Image (cartoon, rainbow, N blue to C red):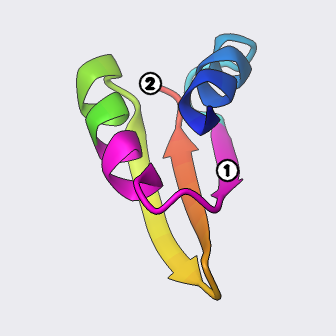
């Protein structure tokens, strides 16, 4: 679900803008790496704290 919401949010953004996503799904970091690799967006940061993943994506 975080990827779908991210895809919709990025569609409303301009190139170079940055989106921060919070997720609790343990698979989120890998999903976001694959999503960015496939779409050309850049995963600037991926970290976990207390079970919450913070993923920072830069629009291509």
| Image height of 18 relative to 27, above or below | above
- Say few, some or many: other residues with alpha carbon within 10 Å of mark 2 (under 14 / 14 to 19 / 20 or more): some
Taking 8 as reference, is 3 above or below it? Answer: below
Q: Helix, strand or loop at disc 1? A: strand
Query: Can you identify the residue that label 1 sits on?
Result: 21
Q: Which residues are magenta?
A: 18-33
Tell me what residue is drawn at x 35 percent, y 33 percent.
36
Residue 47 in magenta stretch: no
Q: CA distance from mark 1 to mark 2?
A: 16 Å
Q: Residue 30 in the image: x percent, y percent?
A: 31, 51
| Mark 1: few/some/many CA within 10 Å (<14, 14-19, 20+) | some
Q: Pick whichever of labels 1 and 2 is earlier in the sequence.
A: 1
Please name whichever residue, 43 or 1, is drawn nearer the observer in this view of the structure.
1
On the image, which quarter does residue 54 sit in?
A: bottom right
Q: Of residues 35 and 40, which is closer to you in this image?
A: 35
The N terminus lies in quadrant = top right
What mark, if any, has residue 36 been given in the picture? Answer: none
Total numbered labels: 2
Query: Quick one: SS at disc 2?
Result: loop
Quadrant in the rendering for residue 51: bottom right
Q: Residue at x 46, y 52 (%)?
A: 28
Res. 29 image quadrant = bottom left
Q: Which residue is mark 2?
A: 60
Q: Position of residue 35 (x, y in %)?
A: 35, 30
On-image quarter of the C terminus: top left
Estimate the x, y position of residue 34 in percent, counting from the top left.
27, 36
């Amino acid at each position: 679900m975080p990827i779908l919401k991210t895809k919709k949010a990025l569609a409303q953004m301009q190139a170079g803008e940055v989106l921060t996503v919070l997720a609790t799904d343990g698979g989120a970091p890998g999903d976001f790496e694959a999503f960015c690799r496939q779409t050309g967006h850049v995963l600037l940061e991926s970290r976990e704290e207390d079970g919450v993943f913070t993923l920072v994506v830069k629009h291509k």
